[in-house]
Amino acid sequence: KSKEPQAANKKVYISYDISNMRTRISVRDDGEGFDWRKRLAGELTAGLHGMGIKLAESFVSSVSYNAKGNEASFEIANQRDSTNLIP
């Protein structure tokens, strides 16, 4: 899709908030979004699409999406008094 002409001017926006207890990161793009509710309800099957959501959920404290499906936010609990194993 990145080579399609209509994708050339679309942008990706990343914001983050880091505190002592947690790190929150949001990623949004200019795309049409996707039906994340359907993906969350579906079974995980091997393939090229849909595995990122399930994989991300296994590494973070929480994942949320906006209604349109073009923004994902996730939160990571920071480890205190030890080296963070997950960046």
Image (cartoon, helix red, strand yellow):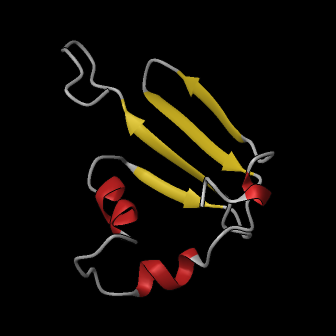
Picture coordinates of residue 65, whole percent (x, y): 61, 61
Q: Is residue 73 above or below residue 86?
A: below
Residue 12: x, y in percent? Answer: 68, 41
Q: Nearer the viewer, residue 15 or 4?
A: 4
Toward which corner of the image does residue 14 lie, by quadrant?
Answer: top right
What is the quadrant of residue 16 in the picture? top right
Number of numbered tags placed on the structure image = 0
Residue at image location 55% in from the left, 74% down from the top:
36
The answer to which of 13 and 26 lies nearer the viewer is 13
**Percent of width and height locating residue 26:** 60, 42
Q: Is residue 48 above or below residue 9?
A: below
**What quarter of the picture does the N terminus occupy?**
bottom right
Q: Is residue 28 above or below residue 45?
A: above
Residue ID at (81%, 45%): 9
Q: Is residue 45 left or right of residue 18?
A: left
- Residue 60 location, x and y as percent? 35, 46
Q: Is residue 47 left or right of residue 16?
A: left
